[in-house]
Amino acid sequence: MNSLRLGSYSFSSRLILGTGKFSSTRVMLEAVRASGTQLVTVALRRFNRNQAEDDLFGPLSEIRGITLMPNTSGAATAREAIKAAHISRELSGSPFIKVEIHPNPHHLMPDPIETYEACKVLAAEGFIVMPYIPADPVLAKRLEDVGCSSVMPLGSAIGSGQGLANAEMVRLIVRESTVPVIVDAGLRSPSEACAAMEMGCEAVLVNSAIAVARYPVAMAGAFAKAVEAGFEARNAGIMPRSGSAVATSPLTSFLGAAS
Amino acid sequence: MSDLPSWLTDARLSEEIEPLLRNEDDDSLERLAAEAQAVTLRRFGRIISLYAPLYLSNFCSSGCVYCGFASDRTSPRRKLDASEIEKELLAMKALGISDVLLLTGERTNAVGFDYLCRAVEVAARHMPRVAVEAFPMSIAEYRGLAECGCTAITIYQETYDPENYGKLHRWGPKQDFLERLETPERALAGGIRSVGIGALLGLSEPVGEALALMRHARHLCHTWWKAGVSVSFPRIRPQEGEYRPQFTVSDRFLARMIFAFRIGMPDIDLVLSTRENPEFRDGMAGLGITRMSIASRTTVGGYVESDTASARQFEVSDNRSAKEFCLALRSKGLDPVFKNWDSAYNEPVTCKEATCH
């Protein structure tokens, strides 16, 4: 109950980290350690096989207890994402693939049609498929149907720091889903990560909010605590919010007592 | 000349930016810098993507008064063959470079489309991202270039003032203002993923140039929703021919212009080359600028043979080595990133996907 299950893998941490945007690889690695995460995503774009200082894959693969989840950021089509997934698996050996297909390279919103097509193929090929998607409950079910191991709706636009602007749709996805729902993108502060967990998400993925914080390592620790608190609160049973006033004189007394 | 396109003259496309450019006080400059930094940080984080130019040839058919490669310059002409290109690429790779911009002059018999295609093919074998800054081509030619592995095209309008444009381009195919203006769209129609645009600052009145450039960038983003669009800010530099620019573009104005672009177009790459000096480049990194050239040689054969390989197109102001420049970025809390792309994503964007016109 207390572990996050993705495919045949289970993780005690429910915080997933993105690895881009940091001021240095060293700071990124320290943030990864401080977060206690067991699953990190790294873009194929940032695999540098020439053993350069900007390579993220090599240093991450040396941290014990971390599973790498390559992502296809940069792909504009299903075809490119599938190609990137194959290359990533060959390079990393990881069965995970985070499918990111954003044909508009400026706002980076995911393409639901291409994402669906890519996920169908990659799930059939045995990948543990984690799609980055718009907060669309119908698409989420369609992706579940083709074998995705989770769905990762946007809290809000990537890098925007607008938090859970899509909260209503995320709630709907959580209510309907039989696979883990992981909020990906848009979170700005630990309290928003906590709220996503209280809402019923199984995990959150955070990158910008940690990478661009003044003290990324400290922020990584803060997110870890918030995710844990949100998950524990949910399991402890959050007091229902009262939806309406209760009349002092019962409105239904005329019906008599139940026999 | 035919009528200018309506987007180029539509003031609504840049009206919120003009006041930012016309202010001259220190307070407003500082406020813009802070906002530009915040927008950059949010969208791009603390990284700077790096690239380097590779001059393939200095043959040229045009008569641009401001360019060291113009066809009336007396410097010897040269073009690299396939094996020389490969050697240059290997020398660049040894510096860590993974993102190359291939450059030529305007089309000549010596250096045309076929030559460029072969050069792109060689480059794509060594570099995940290959961009081209050469002569305008047809849609079919751009399609061919994309199929050879070209990811991006850079094409500067030089100046958006049509009258001035006519005077500065004394002869050759580059004399056609509208043909050049439409070139980025032909590249996108041909399947090139990204286009870089810019004005050579100093050729015409700077505020007007900045506004037209932003209209151009916005027009491309609106019309070609899958296109990557980047904007460069080249200031004219000393060159053989010794053209003196008519307009002065101060550091303060250029900084203001870059801040205004970052605020007005938060998601696009803004590029600063080694035309600028180390102090300005270091200062602007992360204040709007997200992409920078490094260890540039503006001579044909300059990476292998030394900087005297041929005449320069222009003088470089930042002569720091790749290592020195990276150290400077790191000391500002920025991460220099050589590889921020992968060849897995180099398929041409088909005409249908790119919204064919």
Image: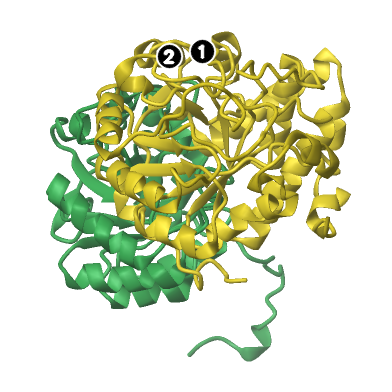
Chain colours: A green, B yellow
For the residue pair B58 and A118, the one nearer the viewer reads as: B58
Q: How far from the left and from the top, in percent, is residue B109?
A: 47, 47
For residue B263, side relative to residue B76 (left or right): right
As drawn, is A43 to the left or to the right of B177?
Answer: left
- Quarter of the picture containing the C terminus of chain B is bottom right
Residue found at x 52% / y 57%: A104
- Helix, strand or loop status at disc 1: loop
Residue closest to the eye, A154 or B12: B12
Residue located 68% across and 76% down the image: A250
In this picture, is B286 found above or below B104? above
For residue B325, which numbered disc appears in the image?
A: 2
Specify the amino acid type for callout 2.
Phe
Question: Is B244 or A48 nearer to us in this picture?
Answer: B244
Q: Quadrant of residue B281?
A: top right
- The residue at the point 66 percent across, 35 percent down is B63
A80 shown above or below A52: below
Q: Are marks 1 and 2 on the same chain?
A: yes
Residue B318: numbered disc: 1
Q: Which residue is rendered at x = 51% and y = 48% of the image?
A: A158
Element type at mark 2:
helix
Number of residue marks: 2
Where B273 sits versus A243, above or below?
Answer: above
